[in-house]
Every structure is written in C-alpha cells, then in structure tokens.
Image (spheres, coloured by chain):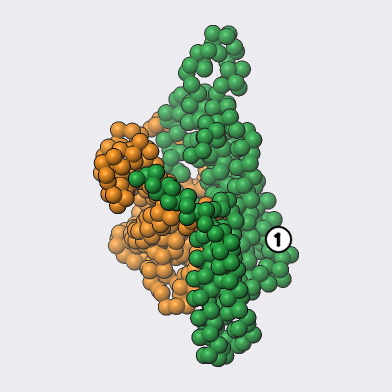
Chain colours: A green, B orange
Amino acid sequence: MASRTVALGRGRAGGLPGLGWLALALGLGLLLAAVWNVWNFPLDGVPPGRKGLSLTLIVLGLASGIYGLAILARRMTGVVPALLAALLTLVAVEGLLRAYGVPPGLIPTPTRVATALYNSRTVLLGDARVTFVQEALLGYLAGVGMGILVALAAVRFPFLERGALPYAGLFASIPIVALAPVIVKAFGLEWPSKAIIVAITVFFPVVVNVVRGLQSASPLLLDLMQTYAVTPAASFRLVRVPSALPFLFNALKIGSTLALIGAIVGEFFGTTGQGLGFRIQIEAGRFNLDIVWAAIVIASVLGIAFYGVISWLEMRFTSWHASRRQPG
Amino acid sequence: MIIVAALALALYWPLMLWVNAGAAQRSLDNGAELGCTTAIACATQLRNPVLPAPAQLGNSLRAMSVPPLAPTSVPYNTLITAGETVVGLLIASVLGIGLAVALVGSRAFERVTLPWLIASQTVPVIALAPMLAVVLGQYGVQGWLPKALIAAYIAFFPVAVGVAAGLRSPDPMQEDLLTTYRASGWQTFWKLRLPASLPFLFTSLKVAATAALIGSIVAEISTISFSGLGKMLAENSRASDTLALWVIMLYGAGLGIALVAVLGLLERLVTPWRAGQSR
C-alpha cells in the first residue's frame, strides 16, 4: 500500500513540468491583463463591464496559476514555489482591490505600498535605524549578556537555581504590553526605555535555555574529563559550553523575534517622534495605510534578516550537533 | 524559592528609596507641597514614583479592585480582556488545526505556503494590529469581536506550525503497524496522527496564549474601546498615572500566568499519557 502510493506520487511528479510553467505563465498573464483592464479609474468610476471582465480574468488566472503551481511544487523544493505563490497572490490582490475600487485609506494596493516604500524611504530608514539598531539590537545584546551571566551564576550556585529559576518561567508569560508603559514612564520617552523593554523580554528565555543547556552536559563526558585530571575551568569550556550552545542558539532565535516585537510595542506607548512602531501607530490613525504597510514590510524584512543571521551563526557554531546532522 | 522572593523584596526597599530620592529632591527644590521635609522621607509618597513603595502599590491595588465588577475596576476589565483572548485562541486553534491538516495532506500546498508561515513567525506580527483594527472598524466590526480576531490572527501561526509538526511526529514504525492492520488513511489520521499532535498543540498554544493576550491588549489600545486592560492602559498612560499602570501591569501579568496555567491543566487532562513526562 505504502509503496504503491510512493510509486503513484513519483509517476505524477515526473509528469510535464513544462505544462506547469505554461499554466503558471498563462495565469500570471491573465491576472496582469485583469489589473491592466482596471488600471486608471477613479475609485467609484470602474465601469461595470470592465469590473466583470477583470473579475472573470482573475478567477481564470488564479485557477490556471494554482494548477500550474501545484504541478511545479511537486517537483521543486526550496523557496521558489513560495515566491511564485506570493507573486500570484499580490497580482490577484492588486486586481481585486482595483476592480472593486477599495479606497487606499482602507486597504492600499501592493503597487501603492511599493510607491510609498520608495517615496518615504529616508523617513522609514531613519525609523528602522532607531527601532532596530538602537532599541532592538542594543537591548538584545544587553539582555543576552545579562541572561548568560545570570545563567552561569545559577549553575554555579544551586541555591540560586532552585530559588530564582522558577520565577523566570513566570516572568516570561507576562505580556510585554503591560510592562511597556510602566518602563516608558520610569525611564523616559527616549530610546533607552525601549532598549530596556527589549532586554527584559530577551533575558528570560536566555536564562532558562542556557541553564538547561549547561546542565545537559553528559555526566559520562564530565567523568572522562575528571579521569584526565582536567581542571574544572577547562572541563567547563570543553564539555559544558559546547553542550549549552544549541540551547543558547534556540534562545537567541526566540529572542530575535521578541526583540523586534518589544521595540515596536514599546513605541506604541510614547517616543520622541521616530521609530517603526511610532510610525505605524501615527499613520494608521491618519489612514495613511500605504505607509503603515511599508513600515510593516521593513519590519518584516528586518525580522527575517535578523533570524537568518542567527540561524547562519548557529550553523557555523553547532554544525556538529545531532539536529543538524540528520534531517528532521 | 520563597527565600529568594523575600530577599528580592528586601532589596526592593533600598532600591526604591534610592531611585525615588532624586525625583523627590527635585520636587522639593521646586517647592512642591509634599507634606514631608527630606528627600528620603518623600521617596515613599511621590505621586508619580519611578518605583512605587509597597504601601502605595497596596493602596492603589485596593482602590482599583473594589468593587470588583464596576466598569472602572481592574478585575472587571481583566475579565473582558481574558474573554477576548480566549475566544481568539479558540478561533486560532480551529483555523490553525485546519491549515495544519491541509499542510500535512498536500505536499505541494506545503511547499507553497510553509516558507511564508515560517517567515511570518519571525515578523513582528503585532505591527499589524493597529492597522487591522482600523480596517475592521471600517467594515463595521466593533466591540469585542475585532479584539478577538486580532488575538486569533496573532495566535494562529504558532498553532498551525506546531500542529503540522505534531501531525508528522508519529514514528514510521507506528505508521507501518497501522498499514499492516489495513487502516485507511482516515483511520491513521484519527487514531494516530491526531493524538500524536496534541502535545504539540498544547506547547504551541502556551506560546500563542501570551501572544494572543498581547494582541488583544494592543487591539484595545488602538481601537475605540470602552473596556479592557488595554483601554485602561491607554487612559492611564495618557494621564501619567504611574501607580495605576503598575496595578494594571500586575493584573496583566496575573492574567498571562493564569492563561498558561489553565492550558497546562487542560494539557494534563487531555493528554494524560504524557503527564509523567512533562515536568
């Protein structure tokens, strides 16, 4: 039974990638035609005939595109199918929004967002610098550093571990939004208050994971070090630190997401007039949603890049670990 | 554990006096009427302390919690926010499990959507909340529903990714066993994959619960709302009432911890076979 499904799948997968590309191209073409058909009209001025034509084209284009994508995705791995799917979706959304004449104050079309991204690039890049470099990155480094120090202390003094570590789990489930206004009030509107919020949110996962990692060292290896008469310090460096690294990187990855969220949420409670969170809130209030989307795009790109850099570091430093050697 | 808590509280007093003394000195220098003469004596009586004195915090905690069900009291608003978050989590679980089943069912669908799901985990989804609030408000979705929807939106991705991993977690040996029993695909799914995914569901729900709580609070801040922790936060943040903010923070923290604890309890009930392993 199992082998039959495999054979069936392989047979289908081998079939006609050319047809897939053709269907995908046809779908994209139909969608582009649908967009072009309703390109330059005032919001409530799309003639019903053109609207109907565009909607038909979008349905046909999506059907053809999805069919093609389904064929291609069976053979291709990696990010190419996902990127193609995003392209298809974006063009279809553009067509739908234009055909229905949705006001840009409600949902801006993708091209409008791209235009806003380009037009306000200096402002948005300045915001990104404040949010990412000053608030998220500095807070992240401070939180990770403090977390590692506390974890080392907790492993060295079991009293601390038994007494203080249970609180780390509790503190980790406190919502940042409740914490943020208090810290902004206490430390002022400038960027350090946001860096402190980020540091606090990153701190707890690092402590919990590093302690668990340092303790995950195999007792056998520690015994072996002892029979070699290795000094405790060297044994720590040779056995405990490497076994803690995968756990540390796990925490670093969790923290990279938390850092951006912390910085952006912190800005919702007051800033000095710069930052992505500030920009998002202020422009959402003014119904300039194209700029809001542009800021979200930048925040997303930063978030993915941050995560990517840490994953890359993880690969370099823990390539020996079992989870990397074997897939799954 | 209790000794450390006592130690932290004991350390809190001098720290509080130290950080507040500066502010107290400044207001004394400006000639403010505080009813005390030295900076140290005033440190426990500031209207907007950097760190509140325990007695001050206790007083405002009592003042803001009584009567518990008045629309202006914090417990009532905590319940409102808790309700929104729980509804959001329910919506997120249903949608997340549905998407996970689709992901596991079709390899092509997975290849097209999974990279985006993973990328969305690294994106500060919370940035979308103020905008979603505006858009939903435009279409006449008001009251508690938009908050629950935003909470669901934020909790949805961790649930989908977690359940998809869980549905794939059964050992190939177990799948082979069911094949030898001539179990249909549906039976394999129902009897093996779904139970195997439950622990993953709860792990991701715990992550999602905190995220959903943040989502509903941010939604309350950025939409027109008349109740909820977020509305109280926004009000008191504008009024610069530091003590009230501390009280709301304590309630928010309590709610977050309670949500995760309830999920942990549910996990024990639903997956009793794992009770020995976890914790």
Label 1 CA crowd tier, 10 Å (few <14, some 14–19, many 20+):
some
Of B149 and A157, nearer the camera is B149
Could one spot residue B261 in this view of the protein? no
Where residue A186 appears, as percent x and y from the top left, is 56, 52
The N terminus of chain A - image quarter:
top left
Where residue A250 appears, as percent x and y from the top left, is 53, 39
Of A177 and A289, nearer the camera is A289
Please name the amino acid that badge 1 sits on.
Leu
Where B229 falls versus A136 (above or below)?
Answer: below
What residue sits 47% from the left and 18% below the top?
A219
**Residue that numbered label 1 is attached to:** A125
What residue sits 50% from the left and 40% below the top?
A205
Where B164 falls versus A204 (above or below)?
Answer: below
Where residue B253 appears, as percent x and y from the top left, is 42, 50
Left or right of A19? Residue B223 is left
Of A240 and A85, nearer the camera is A85
Left or right of B235? Residue B166 is left
Q: Quadrant of residue A34?
A: bottom right
Where B178 falls versus B113 (above or below)?
Answer: above
Where residue A260 appears, as percent x and y from the top left, is 58, 52
What residue sits 60% from the left and 47% below the top?
A307
Where B205 falls versus B14 (above or below)?
Answer: below
Indicate the secondary structure of the residue bearing disc 1: helix
Of A208 and B173, nearer the camera is B173
Could one spot residue B150 in this view of the protein? yes
Label 1: chain letter = A
Q: How many marks?
A: 1
What residue sits 60% from the left and 84% below the top?
A38
